Image: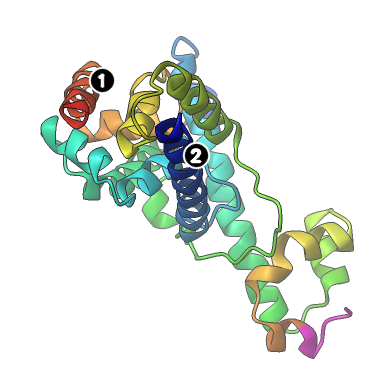
Amino acid sequence: MFNRTRLRFRDMKTIKMLIAGADEQAHGSGEDKPGAEHYLLSAFNLSDGSARRVFERSGADPDKFRDAIEEQYRDALSSVGIDDDAIDADAELITSTKVLHNSKPSGQAVMKALYALKQEDKDRPLLGAHVVAVVAGMEYGVAVRALRAMGVDQACLANAVREELESFHS
Amino acid sequence: MSDIKSLPSADDPEQALAAVVALRVMAERLERKAVRKAIEQGWSWSQVAEALGVTKQAAHKRHAASIPKKKAVKKGDR
């Protein structure tokens, strides 16, 4: 009972850090609301380190994910004949004065899926690896395309999440 | 420029939808940059709003936080 309460407090702290980090990542990319890709970037910065380890287990460098996001945008623009390099539209840091947090639909989907995942996994604290698990299970969107741009296999990533969570449990 | 009617292929909706998302992000970045430059050059929020085809309140709400205050209020109308 006491352990569950302790875990719940820890999870609340993690969620706060995750959301604040996602906002920061989105603003750094010149976007006012975070999407799934920004939640993943935020998960890499969580102190448990599990999101980074999952990527490393899959043979991927988490520090390359941000570049992969830009790469998939470049590829998508190129598919409609736009050369991104020829346009002066680099991301600029934006400042937000919003008091209430809001995410893009893909970011909201991450939070909903995290909640559902945690309902099934009550004995472990919320970890960055859980965020990777959610993104690894997505089918479309910027985060998924960025993973593909990095050559990361989502099934392989999901396996690495399982290994990471099992090792955390033991 | 390539023929936008044929790129990307209509048979590949995922690619077409990804292009739409990328275009939105690019448009947002261009808008932020253009508004910042306009305010720096002394445009009022009313002028920016008119040029963007939105209300002054909408333009201000969307961009004011990202623009250094001394530049925004110098010749602005807020």
Q: Is residue B77 magenta?
A: yes
* Dot 2 alpha-carbon crowd within 10 angstroms: few under 14, some 14 to 19, many 20 or more: many
Q: Position of residue A70 (x, y in %)?
A: 36, 46
Q: Which residue is mark 2?
A: B22
B35 left or right, relative to A24 = right
Label 2 to label 1: alpha-carbon separation: 27 Å
Badge 1: how crowded within 10 Å, few (<14), some, or many (20+)?
many
**Quadrant assignment, res A133:** top left
What residue is rendered at 35% in x and 25% in y? A123
The stretch of residues the image draws in magenta is B73-78
Q: Which mark is residue A3?
A: none
Residue B51 to residue B68: above or below: above
Q: Is residue B35 left or right of residue A125?
A: right
Look at the numbered disc 2 and give the secondary structure of its residue: helix
If the image is split into quadrants, where does the C terminus of chain B sit?
Answer: bottom right
What is the three-letter code of the residue carrying label 1? Ala
Residue position for label 1: A158
Q: Quadrant of residue A68?
A: top left
- Residue located at (79% from left, 67% from top): B48
Q: Amino acid at mark 2?
A: Ala
